[in-house]
Amino acid sequence: MSHPRLIAVACALAWAAEAYAHEDPDEPLDAGAAVDVRPSPEAVFGFDAGTPVDAAALAPTGPDGGSPSLEPADAGAPLGTTVVRSSRAPRSASEVTVTQDVVQAAPRSGATDLLRLVPGLVASQHSGEGKAQQLFLRGFDAVHGQDVELLVAGLPVNEVSHVHALGYADLNWLIPAAVREVRVTEGSYRAFQGDFAVAGTVQYELGLEEPGLTLSASYGSYNRFRLFAGVRPTDAPETFAAVEYVQGDGFGPQRAFGRVSLLGQATLKVGNARLRAVVGSAGARFDSPGVVPQAAVDAGAGFFDVFGLRQGGSTSRHQLLLGAELPHESGRTTLEVCGVLSDLLLRNNFTGYLQHAEGDGLEQQQSNGLVGARAVHRRHFHPFDSLVTLDLGLGGRRDDIHQSQRGYREVDGAPYRDDFAASIVQTAVSAWTEVAWLPARWRFMLGGRLDVLHYDVRDELAFAGAGATRSAFGPHWGLKAGVERALGEAWRLFLNYGDGFRSPQARSLSDGERAPFVHVRGAEVGAAFTTAKVDVRGALFGSYVANDFFFDHTVGTTVYVGSTLRGGAQASVTARPIDGLLLSGSVTGATAHVVQTDSLLPYFAPLVARLDASYSHPFQAWGLAWTPRVGTGLTLIGPRPLPYDEFSRTVFLADVRAALRVGRVELVVDAQNLFDSRWRDGEFVFPSNWNPGAAPSLLPARHFTAGAPRTVAATLEVHL
Amino acid sequence: MKRVALLLVSLSLAACGGTAQTRRTFPVVVSTVPGPLVTDSGWAVTLSSAQLSLASVRFFSGEALVRRGPLPWRFDPLGWLVPSAWAHPGHYVPGAAMGELLQPLTVDLLAAETPWGTADGVTGTYGSLQLSLGAEGLRLKGTATKGADSVVFDTGSFAPPAAIEGVPFSHVMDTSAGRVRVAVDLAAILSRVDFALVGSGADPLDPASPAFNGFARGVEDSSVYHATWEAAE
């Protein structure tokens, strides 16, 4: 860590320590927070449920300024107590919380599976098990994260001005077993949603499901090997430490990978204050087979063949978050500081020898040091016998980026051409507010958000290596508004509006340019029906982008398309109709088109459906607790429009899980892509030439990345 | 399941049309620009053979820059003293590839027209094309006369070392039927040739002679190739 970064972290720590010195009592619970009272895992194993709730175990929510939620108290509860679980109160029909039982319902071997938990989201892993997934959500092709804001335990995942793609969000370091819940805020209707929250925000919260020590080992198809160890204290449900090691040969040539990830979170209550620390370190190396030309397959090449040697990459990430939550009699203040160090080395060649006789391979390198701080203050008022809540947020973030791109020779991998090298300091300062008035069964929310971006860019190669500097600066203002109406105990109607934005790529800015933003205006109308056993939601959504562009990152071209319009509908259901049975599904239909030409935007996902289901039936036999469970995850992705009026193929994937736990030992068998469907994970249209001696066709042609065939893995897990 | 997905997607997208562009094919024919063959130095040429070896033609979105003079409405009082430099062919950005025909062909330019083949392309705005000649390039044989002088010549084969870029072809390509005609202006190719300056000989033409140089410059000149869209009747 550089000297300025150390100073910044030290200042932030001092701020956190000062904040920790304040003590305030807990705030009251917000009206509208859904509370789900059901037996704890301990109760499921044969103990009595229905004993009184320990109200002291209820804690306010995370720092996003959302409604307070009741945190799980199962770990801290003595045997025989009932655990109260609560999800945050949604503020739009498509604001959902995916709970841990849904996360664990079906096989989750990595980040792609965790992303599929988000209703309507398509995640494509087209360059090996280490590169960020390409995301599609609500009519947006978010490339590697430019339209979806991703956070893990409050730590930002999107990388600004990334060399490979704007908003690059690598989640491969996230350990699936350590995901406690997924908070999804689709659209951009909430003021806490920041940069890249164009199609929505996804927040992963961390925690292990079971207290004690958990050890597991997995072995599966293609020599995939996984070791996991996690520990969670009984009296601190959010505190844990976990490490995961995974390696494998991959399902075809040039797909080997290995990664290790360490994650930890500690919470500590000091008086009324709640302190939180999150740490993590991860490293990965991966090979990539490249992109397969369909014409080559038609001519006899293999579906899993390699096009382009030496593709793949290496990543590392180290992160730290320190937070303090300070309740007071009429609200709560949350303070957080964080630091993330991340590195990426990526080699890819999607076009062969199309541009250069030596080969079009690109070696991209990025090092980023992020330091950020955030403060959220929430306060309640009670004017005229009604409730008013005020949320105020302030945030700052500095990214210190070093990036380069150079060409390498296909024959030996030697670099032969420098494309660019830049040092960037990108600073973002934000302030936001939400004011909500809750008269009777109504809730009116009005909010706004101001973001100011500052860029210092040093182009290292300009002027024959002497370098050139430029800077840019610009603000963005966005409005947020919402109306809710409760109908009876179960129904809620929502109407929402919100402006979102995406920061620009630093290298694209000229000196003195007022930093342009891609500005999205979104609106949604929907309804939710929530009871103790079922939660059903439906929404119609639309968004308008005035100055949109389409970035084809496979060939690095940007096409400005003017104003674009997206719309669609989404329905989701989570039901627990009987003890042990869980059903969680969603269907999203979307469309996206260019206003000026009245034509479809390519690549977005018009139809996405997902179903996660599981059933478990614990019983006692021979003095032991037996818990068999089965689960499935079904994914349907409809044909996606491609350039030149073509469509991708439909994808249907079925994953299944069968597990049996006896006492402290559990055997889990996972099968993914059960029907061994030969599917295309990514489909693209661009020109390529893999025959350096021939006159290449320059016309765009269909290419694809092969999806994984059926894989089976067995896991032996011991709980101590 | 897949059929249901396809049906649902088709229904949801039916109101929005396609993705702006679509693929199409179109035929390409090769001919010459009709007219007498008279060089700038006054030689009247009669050809007995004209063989053109073609390698490929590619169509691009970028427009060729061929403006050769000041715009008439632009007032330039000092223009007579310090003339402006104007863009000339070659300074252009090809842009996106819109179509191509990669099938080699040798054309007898004395024939009325020769079908080249069917090009693969996409709809959209075309601005220019790039013509690649085969290894044999262009070879002309014939007789040049000027007054009482008569020269029998054979240029030999000449192929430019690089593709001829920036041939103008402005057309908004949709899905309607038609064809592209590439016409070679032999008069323009021969315009620079002075058959009095043939060096060591005209049959075959001395490659080191000024006459051959004029011929080669003509072959390389993108303005001697005329591309037009001919809509189907």
Image (cartoon, rainbow, N blue to C red):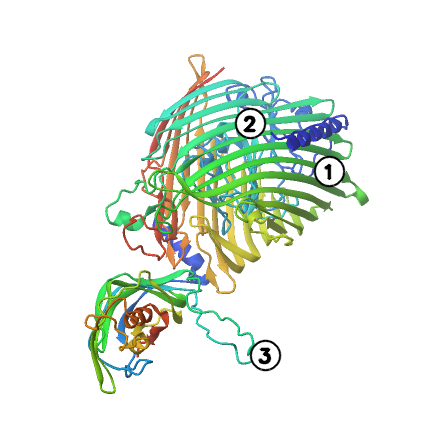
Position above or below: A283 against B55? above
For the residues marked 2 and 3, what is the alpha-carbon distance in whole angstroms? 69 Å
Residue for badge 1: A378
Dot 3 amino acid type: Phe
Q: Chain of mark 1?
A: A
Q: Nearer the viewer, residue A163 or A144?
A: A163
Residue corresponding to mark 3: B75
Q: Position of residue A275 (x, y in %)?
A: 68, 26
Q: Judge whether residue A496 can be spotted in this image.
A: no
- Crowding at mark 3 (Cα within 10 Å: few <14, some 14-19, many 20+): few
**Residue that label 2 marks:** A280
Q: Is residue A592 visible?
A: yes
Judge the density around disc 1: few (<14), some (14-19), many (≥20) Cα neighbours within 10 Å.
many
Q: Does dot 2 land on a helix, a strand or a loop?
A: strand
Q: Chain of mark 2?
A: A
**Callout 2 crowding tier (Cα within 10 Å): few <14, some 14–19, many ≥20:** many
